[in-house]
Image (tube, rainbow, N blue to C red):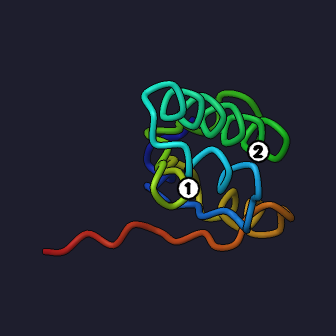
Amino acid sequence: MDDSDSHLHFVFMNYDPQYERLRSDKSKKGAKQLDSYLSKKHDRILADNLQPGTYKKTISLVIVDGFAVEITDQQANVLRSAKEVRIVEKNQELS
């Protein structure tokens, strides 16, 4: 991955009934299941759409079914076209 061309992007997913079901379980076990489900889901979306070693997922966001990933603008466009993805936004750093 060429770090000079990659930037942090936030990727937010389309509606997922499995996510909603898991999120409604407020137990510790439910929270662990949700974390595991989202991490695997987000990893799969990246693996299905981008070349291995060209991106770095930094976090899965449980509260909104999304994740942060370091990618190029071209890779962001690829993810925008994935059917599971609702929106991809580049992180805007405030100066």
- Number of disc labels: 2
Q: Quadrant of residue 27?
A: top left
Q: Quadrant of residue 28?
A: top left
Q: Position of residue 10 (x, y in %)?
A: 50, 61
Within 10 Å of the Cα at label 2, are there few (<14), some (14-19), or many (20+) other Cα atoms? some
Q: Quadrant of the C terminus?
A: bottom left
**In the picture provided, is 10 more to the left or to the right than 13?**
left
**In the picture provided, is 18 more to the left or to the right than 88?**
right
Residue at horizontal 76 percent and vertical 58 percent from the top: 17
Position of residue 2 relative to residue 93, above or below, is above
At numbered mark 2, what does the secondary structure look like: helix, strand or loop? helix
Asked if disc 1 and disc 2 are in contact, CB closer than 8 Å, the reply is: no
Position of residue 90 relative to residue 72, above or below, is below
Which amino acid type is shown beneath numbered disc 1? Gly
Q: Nearer the viewer, residue 42 or 93?
A: 42
Q: Position of residue 69 (x, y in %)?
A: 52, 47
Distance CA(mark 1)–CA(mark 2) = 11 Å
Sequence order check, earlier mark of 1 and 2: 2
Position of residue 89 relative to residue 58, above or below, is below
Q: Position of residue 74 (x, y in %)?
A: 69, 62
User: What label sits on residue 45 in the rendered view?
Assistant: 2
Q: Nearer the viewer, residue 29 or 49?
A: 29
Residue at horizontal 69 percent and vertical 56 percent from the top: 75
Residue at horizontal 67 percent and vertical 62 percent from the top: 13
At numbered mark 1, what does the secondary structure look like: helix, strand or loop? strand
Query: Which residue is disc 1 drawn over?
Result: 66
Which amino acid type is shown beneath numbered disc 2? Ile
